[in-house]
């Protein structure tokens, strides 16, 4: 390996360490506790080194948001690909979304502004649009009435998302109902919305 490649690998490793440290701080202390100083202390670098990789905390938050959407997109796509029936695909995708929200709650909070300020530009990143497009495509498969308009798909997507994100948020902010009740509410709601798609 040449010196240029070695230097680039070291830079990549340092950048990853910064992001890993940020996520670790958040998991231990919550999003309000995150600071450039704490990240520097955790990886035993000086704060100016951190600024060589990220111009400010917002840059770190942006990259973590991007990573969260990549991970969510992978999980939703895998859920879709695990089913062949269009209704089962859509149900599995929303269940994967739900599971992600709790398995990766720090990412979810940042991505969707649950107890954390998120930037509007996050919604425009390609990784976020990819995730939304997966859902739009699955909904379009179920819309058999012709012609299908973007408004039809948009309405159904936001019906799903509003309900599921609302239920997730309630449970992240203040522990809502128990898991069995949440699962019953979630599955019943998903099935009802799927049933309504062509009514």
Image (cartoon, grey):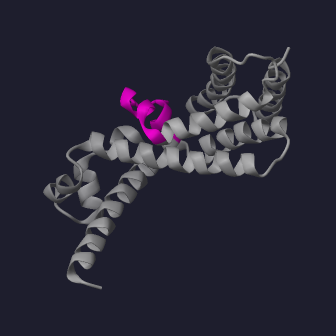
In the rendered image of this protein, does residue 102 appear above or below residue 45? above
| Residue 123 placement, left or right of 150 | left
In the rendered image of this protein, does residue 105 appear above or below residue 48? above
Task: Specify whether residue 74 is painted magenta.
Answer: no
Residue 30 position, x and y percent, is 42, 42
Report the quarter where the C terminus lies. top right
Q: Which residues are magenta?
A: 108-126
How many marks overall? Answer: 0
* Residue 175 visible in the displayed image: no
Residue at position x 58%, y 46% from top? 73
Residue at position x 36%, y 62% from top? 16
Residue 190 position, x and y percent, is 78, 28
Residue at position x 81%, y 17% from top? 145
| Residue 34 placement, left or right of 97 | left
Residue at position x 22%, y 51% from top? 37
Seen from the viewer's position, the closer of residues 174 and 135 is 135
Residue 133 position, x and y percent, is 59, 35
| Residue 73 placement, left or right of 16 | right
Quadrant of the image occupied by residue 154: top right
Task: Specify whether residue 120 is painted magenta.
Answer: yes
Seen from the viewer's position, the closer of residues 172 and 142 is 142
């Amino acid at each position: 390996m040449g010196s240029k490649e070695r230097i680039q690998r070291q830079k990549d490793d340092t950048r990853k360490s910064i992001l890993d440290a940020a996520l670790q701080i958040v998991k231990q202390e919550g999003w309000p506790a995150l600071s450039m100083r704490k990240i520097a202390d955790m990886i035993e670098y000086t704060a100016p080194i951190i600024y060589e990789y990220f111009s400010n905390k917002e840059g770190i938050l942006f990259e973590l948001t991007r990573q969260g959407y990549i991970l969510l997109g992978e999980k939703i796509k895998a859920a879709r690909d695990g089913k062949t029936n269009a209704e089962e695909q859509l149900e599995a995708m929303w269940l994967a979304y739900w599971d992600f929200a709790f398995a990766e709650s720090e990412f979810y909070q940042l991505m969707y502004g649950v107890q954390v300020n998120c930037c509007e530009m996050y919604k425009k990143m390609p990784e976020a649009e990819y995730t939304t497009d997966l859902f739009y495509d699955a909904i379009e498969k179920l819309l058999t009435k012709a012609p299908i308009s973007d408004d039809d798909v948009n309405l159904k997507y936001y019906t799903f998302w509003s309900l599921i994100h609302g239920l997730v948020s309630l449970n992240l902010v203040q522990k809502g109902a128990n898991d069995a009740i949440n699962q019953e509410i979630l599955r019943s709601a998903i099935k009802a919305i799927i049933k309504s798609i062509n009514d």
